[in-house]
Image (cartoon, rainbow, N blue to C red):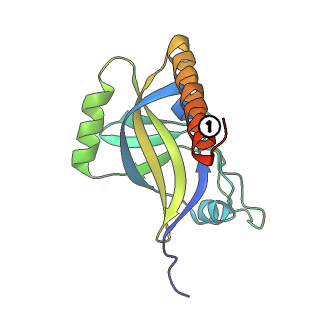
Amino acid sequence: MPREQGRKVVSSNRKAHHDYAILDTYEAGMALTGTEVKSLRAGRASLVDAFGHESSGEIFLHGLHIPEYTQGTWTNHEPRRIRKLLLHKDEIRKIQGKLRDEGITLVPLQVYFQNGYAKVELALARGKKSYDKRQDLASKDAQREISRAMGRRNKGMS
């Protein structure tokens, strides 16, 4: 069977862009068991409450929920186990240095398959305050209204 080509998104964390200011992104592989991969290929995963954590020179993903594979047997995996992320050493060092700063956290943005391999897109992020969130929503609304007005003007309407 030929290897899959392209990118197939399994799950995305849409609240991350609302709750955090994204500073930098990284792509990492995940160390998974067989039933986890099968469950991901079925399109089942949840990034709610997931976060990255550095421990003894390695990066781990906590809180990623991959439900048990329905056709699995006694070899099925634990749904919320801690998963090791596969990154280069220099990337790990950069992440470690930035995580030492106050208020910086490691947030997963997407879980996807890239050319047949399960990957996670991680972001170094800083939490937004409530007034920042309101300001972002107001600017999005204003931009949406501007684009609507420009569309009406281009169509010859008032």
Residue at (58%, 44%) from the top-left corner? Answer: 81
- Report which residue position mark 1 lands on: 148
Q: Quadrant of the C terminus?
A: top right
Residue at (60%, 34%) from the top-left corner? Answer: 149
Q: Is residue 99 above or below residue 26?
A: above
Q: Position of residue 112 (x, y in %)?
A: 53, 58
Q: Is residue 125 above or below residue 33?
A: above
Whether residue 13 appears in this view of the structure is: no
For residue 96, side relative to residue 27 (left or right): left
Q: Position of residue 82 (x, y in %)?
A: 53, 43
Residue at (24%, 48%) from the top-left corner? Answer: 89
- The total of numbered circles placed on residues is 1
Mark 1: secondary structure: helix
Question: Residue 106 lies in what quarter of the image?
Answer: top left
For residue 158, side relative to residue 91 (left or right): right
Q: Quadrant of the N terminus?
A: bottom right
Question: Residue 97 lies in what quarter of the image?
Answer: top left
Q: Is residue 80 above or below residue 6?
A: above
Residue at (64%, 63%) from the top-left corner? Answer: 35
Q: Nearer the viewer, residue 66 or 33?
A: 66
Q: Nearer the viewer, residue 115 or 36?
A: 115
* Amino acid type assigned to the residue bearing label 1 in the image: Arg
Q: Is residue 12 above or below residue 17?
A: below
Q: Position of residue 143 (x, y in %)?
A: 54, 31
Whether residue 31 appears in this view of the structure is: yes
Residue lying furthest right in this view?
70
Residue lying furthest top in this view?
131
Disc 1: CA contacts within 10 A as few (<14), some (14-19) or many (>=20): few
Q: Nearer the viewer, residue 81 or 67?
A: 67
